[in-house]
Image (cartoon, helix red, strand yellow):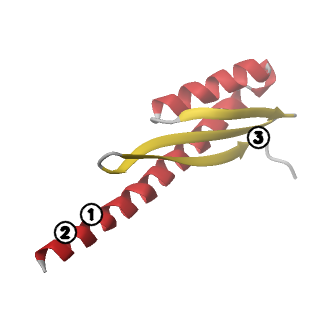
Amino acid sequence: MGLVFVVFGTFGAAIVAAGMARQRAAVAADLGALAGAARALDGDAAACASASDLANRNDGRLVGCHLDGLDVLVTVEVAFTPLPGLSRVASASARAGPVRG
């Protein structure tokens, strides 16, 4: 009976780890997009460099960055280990730019 609890607890912890990694990826993508949008007038290279810097500071890796007018679209990946010996990647995308209306 104890082994069953250990197995279910381990898989429960793996599911929680995946959810937390997805949330970290979303936060890194959001902040990266905002940082990139702040530098959008400086061009694609400056905007994406700023987005990459902020994504890296949040334990993410910028895998995609695109400037669409003054909007910045970024995709960030976060690596995590849900179970010993098993590595996975969570990704998230975000868009930021000026308010329109």
Image: 67 above or below 13? above
Image: 13 above or below 33? below
Spatial CA span between label 1 and label 2: 6 Å
- The amino acid marked with disc number 3 is Gly
Q: Are the two marked residues, 1 and 2, in contact with CB atoms closer than 8 angstroms?
A: yes
| Residue 1 percent across, percent down from the top left | 13, 80
Name the residue located 19 percent from the left edge and 74 percent from the top edge. Answer: 5
Q: Quadrant of residue 11 in the image?
A: bottom left
Name the residue located 65 percent from the left edge and 21 percent from the top edge. Answer: 49
| Residue 13 percent across, percent down from the top left | 31, 62
Spatial CA span between label 3 and label 2: 47 Å
Report the mark closest to the observer, 3 or 2: 2
Mark 1, residue position: 10
Disc 2 is placed on an element classified as helix
Disc 1 is placed on an element classified as helix
Image: 39 above or below 76? above
User: Which mark sits nearer the N-terminus, 1 or 3?
Assistant: 1
- The amino acid marked with disc number 2 is Val
Spatial CA span between label 1 and label 3: 41 Å
Q: Return the mark for residue 97.
A: 3
Q: Return the mark for residue 6.
A: 2
| Residue 70 percent across, percent down from the top left | 83, 34
Q: Are the two marked residues, 1 and 3, in contact with CB atoms closer than 8 angstroms?
A: no
Name the residue located 59 percent from the left edge and 40 percent from the top edge. Answer: 76
Report the mark closest to the observer, 1 or 3: 1
| Residue 54 percent across, percent down from the top left | 54, 30
Q: Residues within 10 Å of mark 1 (few under 14, many from 20)?
A: some
Question: Depth check: 26 or 31 in front?
Answer: 26
Q: Is residue 16 left or right of residue 9?
A: right
Question: Depth check: 47 or 81 in front?
Answer: 81
- The amino acid marked with disc number 1 is Thr
The residue positioned farthest toward the bottom in the image shown: 1
